[in-house]
Image (spheres, rainbow, N blue to C red):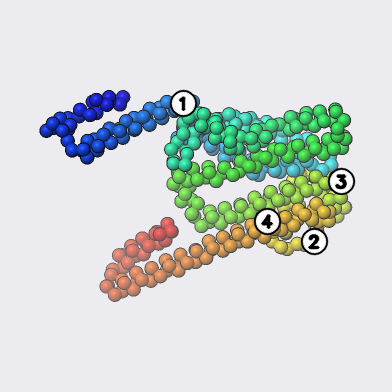
Amino acid sequence: KSPAPPATRERSPLALEGGGRPAALMARSKSVFDLEEWQETQLLAQVETRHVAAIPENNRFRQLWNVVLVILLVYVGTLLPYFVSFYELRIGEELPDGNVRITYWIVDTFFYIDLVLNFFFTYEDSSGEEIFDLRKIAKRYLKGRFLLDVIACMPAVFWGVILKAFEAKGSMSNGGVYKLTRLARLQRASRLTRMASMSRFVDRFSSRYPFFALLKGVTCVRIINFAFTLFWFVHMLACGWYLCAALHRDPMETWVNRRLIDSEGTPLVAASPGVQWVNAMYFVLTVFTTVGFGDIAAVTSGEIVYVCFTMLVGAVVHSIIVSEMIGVVTAMDVEQKEASRRLSLVDNFASNVDLDDAAREGIKTWLRKQAKRGN
């Protein structure tokens, strides 16, 4: 619908009544036509900028891709730090990591695809309007996390080639190139920045599927959530505790070589990655719980600095999680007391009005159901 010509707007049927109209009515009529023209212009602008290649929020492929991204983020937050720490930067003899390499290739492929798809995924602006303009989408992504995504997608071979070029020019010793090559493998850990979008996906699922929103409020689910959060922090710091030893100039002077795992005096450095991870988790848990048995201790300057950092993080995270869990348990006691109070009121009311037993039990059953629902 194209805007009406100015002449048509002025000679409306109302304007012909009685040979004219008051100025206020004419101004109001003009404002109505101006509003319609503005709405038509906005609609045409949206149609022009709505590119066919843009993928909206309610697209089924995008919803499926969001599920794939959640799985990838779970991998990034759990298995990736373990592989980087205990395989990529393993101290001593390197282990065959064919399965790990295959996992890397599969995950890298998905991240490459996601890097391209982000140029076509629509987004909501500050006013809540979904933007379909590919130029605006690309501009927003390039200004956002694009650089971090590119760095995370670069394979370790790329950094190895650059470091070998420095070695060929003679600007760095072989030992320095070897250390930098090991550090270059840490670029995979830059994918941990994608964990920030996990909360966004959870909020989307909660808004789209009310079942998830109800599930988040269940008491036992909240307690399990806190326990997993504590486990995740301990896991990350345990991987960092091993990395602290691996990045030393002489890793044999660190806790990995000082720690003995059997009566024969076998050092931890000769154990499998799984055994090393369990010992690192054990040490971080003793720090978090302020137990400190003393069988694993910080000796070098790097270890002391890292343990101080772990103590600070542990004091904050442990206190927050414990206080939240205490709050959940306390709320359960309050809810139970309130439910008991209501049932007691029903009994008193039924006794005063001579209510029959069937009606009394019906009311009490309804109150119990409401209490289970949190009402």
- Disc 3, disc 1: CB below 8 Å? no
Mark 1 sits on what residue?
Answer: 51
Q: Is residue 367 left or right of residue 204?
A: left
Q: Earlier in the sequence, mark 2 or mark 1?
A: 1
Q: Position of residue 38 (x, y in %)?
A: 34, 32
Say which label, 3 or 2, has the lower sequence index. 3
Q: Secondary structure at mark 4?
A: helix
At mark 1, the secondary structure is loop
Cβ atoms at labels 3 and 2 below 8 Å apart? no
Which quarter of the image is occupied by the N terminus?
Answer: top left
Q: Read off the residue under disc 3.
A: 250
From mark 3 to mark 1, how far is it between C-alphas? 57 Å
Q: CA distance from mark 4 to mark 2?
A: 20 Å
Amino acid at the residue labelled 2: Gly
Tag of residue 213: none
Q: Residue at x 65, y 42 (%)?
A: 192
Residue that carries the numbered disc 2 in the rendered image: 294
Could you say which disc has been placed on residue 313 in the image? Answer: 4
Q: Nearer the viewer, mark 3 or mark 1?
A: 1
The residue drawn where x is 76% and y is 37% is 184
The mark closer to the camera, 3 or 2, is 3
